[in-house]
Amino acid sequence: ITSWTWHANMLSILWQYPETHDWIFSNYINIYATGQDRLGNREVIDFWPRFLTLNECPFIYQQLMKRKTIDIVCNRNIINFFCEMIDCENYIYGIFNEHFISGNYFPHELFIYGYDNDKGFFYTSDFSYTGSYGDKCVKYEDIEEAYYSLKPEDDYLFRGRGGIAFLSYYPNVSYTLNLKFIKESLICYQKSY
């Protein structure tokens, strides 16, 4: 999977379920350019359905929580809370301070999909490990530091509102390959509009 983090994370969930493949094949055709990234620095090319894909995908159940709410609910024990959320069949997606994961301070999206209590680490995925989407085991204490040391102004996810998303597969949907939409998408792509 090579794309933006939000696509790679969602597709890593969906691809496990063959019933989602028709939706993927129908929706990942077109690309678009925004002209600027969120900081206004450069052109950004992305797949259409863009960053809103987590909201638009019928197979993804998304729960958003503010960090302040999480702190109250988990009594500032983020490790146990994340483990409990994973036990409830959720994936964790949010902005973390990469300094404690990769050695450089920069706020970046992180996807947590499992844990090993015996070894004391979380299973994570990201593009920052090797330059392509890959996995890394990150110690509990490093995730805790990466979570709590993030500056509030750097929590840019969800249009700047910040917080953590708990994503899960939603099976109560059926979707068939949408040939009409695929044809329209290919025509738009060919004509570049």
Image: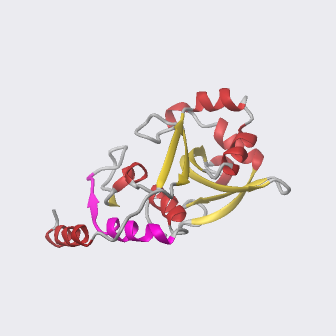
Q: Nearer the viewer, residue 56 or 34?
A: 56
Q: In this orientation, does residue 41 appear?
A: yes
Q: Which of the image's four quarters has the C terminus?
A: bottom left
Q: Is residue 33 magenta?
A: yes
Q: Residue at x 51, y 37 (%)?
A: 154
Question: Where's residue 107, x and y in %?
Answer: 54, 44
Question: Where's residue 26, x and y in %?
Answer: 32, 68
* Colour convention of the picture: secondary structure
Would you say 11 lies left or right of 185 here?
Answer: right
Would you say 42 lies left or right of 12 here?
Answer: left
Q: Quadrant of residue 102?
A: bottom right
Q: Residue at x 29, y 69 (%)?
A: 178
Q: Which residues are magenta?
A: 18-35
Question: Where's residue 168, x and y in %?
Answer: 55, 53
Q: Nearer the viewer, residue 17 or 102?
A: 17
Q: In this orientation, does residue 2 appear?
A: no
Q: Quadrant of residue 146?
A: top right
Q: Residue furthest right?
A: 118
Q: Residue furthest left?
A: 191
Give the tally of numbered discs: 0
Q: Is residue 94 magenta?
A: no
Image height check: is 75 above or below 6? above
Image height check: is 18 above or below 62? below
Image height check: is 179 above or below 158? below
Would you say 48 lies left or right of 7 here?
Answer: left
Question: Where's residue 189, x and y in %?
Answer: 20, 69
